[in-house]
Image: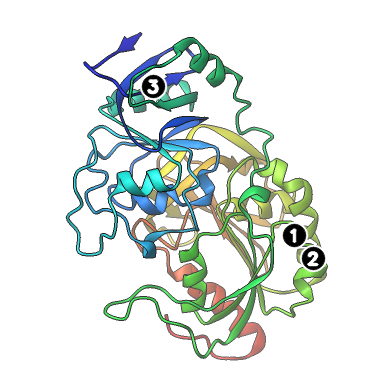
Amino acid sequence: MTHAPAKPTACLALADGTVFYGRGFGATGKAVAELCFNTAMTGYQEIMTDPSYAGQIVTFTFPHVGNVGTNPDDDETGDPVAAGLVVKWDPTEPSNWRAAQRLQDWLASRGRIGIGGIDTRRLTRAIRQQGSPHAALAHDPDGNFDIAALVAEARAFPGLVGLDLAKDVSTRQTYRWNEMRWAWPAGYVQQEAPQHRVVAIDYGAKRNILRCLASAGCDVTVLPATATAEDVLAHEPDGIFLTNGPGDPAATGEYAVPAIRGLVEKTELPLFGICLGHQMLALALGARTVKMNHGHHGANHPVKDMETGKVEITSMNHGFTVDSQTLPAGVKETHVSLFDGSNCGIRVDGRPIFSVQYHPEASPGPQDSYYLFERFAAAMAARSGAAAPAG
C-alpha cells in the first residue's frame, strides 16, 4: 500500500513492498538498514550518535524532533552512526540556548538522511506487530525514485543476525579518558584524583558512559573490541568494564567471549558490563542470546530489581537479549523488564561480576541507575581496601 503527499522528496521502502512518502532533509542519497523505533522524548542527537545504532534507521515516536538543534557537546561519538531517521513532523528551527546548528544541517554535513511527514504511529505499530523490517530510505530533492529497486535493496539487506558490527565502531587504538559528566556551570571538567584503574573494552562505547566511570573515580583506559585477556591485564587494572555496542552478540562473541572468559577465570577483578557488554558476559559465562521481535529502544523502560523489589525507569537500546533460561548455575538473574519479562541483569554468585542490559549513563534518559557505576567503584575499593569515592 502507498501513502503519498503532494510533493514527496523522500521515501521509505520496506522489504514487504510498503512505501511511505515524505519530505526529505539532511543528506541526499540512499541508506539501507534495519528499521527500529525509539520512544525517547529527548536526546535525538545522542541517539543518532550512539554506536549501538549501527546498521539501523531510527523512527522517532515523539514528533518534536529538531527543536533543540544540535551542538558538539551532545555527540556520543565523532559522527552519527545510525543510518537515518524517520519523524512525523519536519524539524523546526531550534529554540534552545545550547543550539549551535540546525538538525537538518548537522545531518547533511555528516551524510545522514532524514524523512519527515510520516505516519510514525502506523509505522511503529507495524514494527511491533511484524518485527523490525529491513528498509531503504531515499532522499532526492527532485522526487525521482526507483521504487522497485529500493524494495529489492531492502529485501537484499542481510539483517543483523550473524553480523559483527563492533569492530566497525570500536576504537582502533588504546587511549585514556578522564573527562567527567556535564555539570552546571562548568560543563565537562577533567578528573584530577582518580582512585581506581579501569580498563574498558570498547565494543561501541558512548562518551557519557566513560564520563560516568570518570565521575565515579575511575582512571579509564579504553582498548579495542579485539583486546585479549593478556592485553587487558597488561594495564594492571583494578576493574574491567565491557561497553555497549551494535550487532549480533554471538558474532562479536567469536573473539570477545574467549577474552572475557579468560578474565573471569584468571582474575578476581570486579567486572561490570552494559548492553552488548552484558550480553558478551552472559555468553562468556555459558548462556545464549536471541534476536528480539522489535527490541527495546527508548528512555522510559521499567526494570525490576529482583533482589530489592525496586523498579527503575531506564534507557534502553538493544535488539538482542540474553535468554535467561540458559543462565548456568552460579549466575543469577538480577533484573527483568516489566514490559515483556526479558532479562535485564545478571551477577555471578560470590564474585564482584555483574552486568545490566540497560544504559545507566542515561544519555538520553532518567538517572535512576547511576548507582551502578558507584557499585562498581565500591567493589574495586573493597578489593583494594580503599574508600570508595562519593558519587
- Residue 98 sits in quarter: bottom left
Seen at 67% across and 37% down, the residue is: 163
Q: The C terminus appears in which quarter of the rendering?
A: bottom left
Disc 3 element: helix
Marks 2 and 1: CB-CB under 8 Å? yes
Please tell me which residue lies in front, 187 or 371: 187
Circle on res. 126 = 3
In the rendered structure, which amino acid carries the disc numbered 3? Ala
Disc 2 element: helix
Residue 26 placement, left or right of 243: left
Seen at 50% across and 36% down, the residue is: 56
Q: Is residue 336 above or below residue 206?
A: above
Whole-percent x, y for residue 150 in the image:
49, 17
> Could one spot residue 3 in this view of the protein?
yes
For disc 2, the neighbor class at 10 Å (few under 14, some 14 to 19, many from 20) is: some
For disc 3, the neighbor class at 10 Å (few under 14, some 14 to 19, many from 20) is: few
Seen at 75% across and 57% down, the residue is: 226
In the rendered structure, which amino acid carries the disc numbered 1? Ile
Circle on res. 179 = none
Whole-percent x, y for residue 29 in the image:
45, 30
Residue where numbered disc 1 is placed: 260
Residue 1 placement, left or right of 162: left
Residue 329 placement, left or right of 317: right
Disc 1 element: helix
Please tell me which residue lies in front, 270 or 180: 180
Q: CA distance from mark 3 to mark 1?
A: 38 Å
Circle on res. 229 = 2
In the rendered structure, which amino acid carries the disc numbered 2? Ala
Colour treatment of the image = rainbow
Q: CA distance from mark 2 to mark 3?
A: 43 Å
Q: Is residue 257 above or below residue 324?
A: below
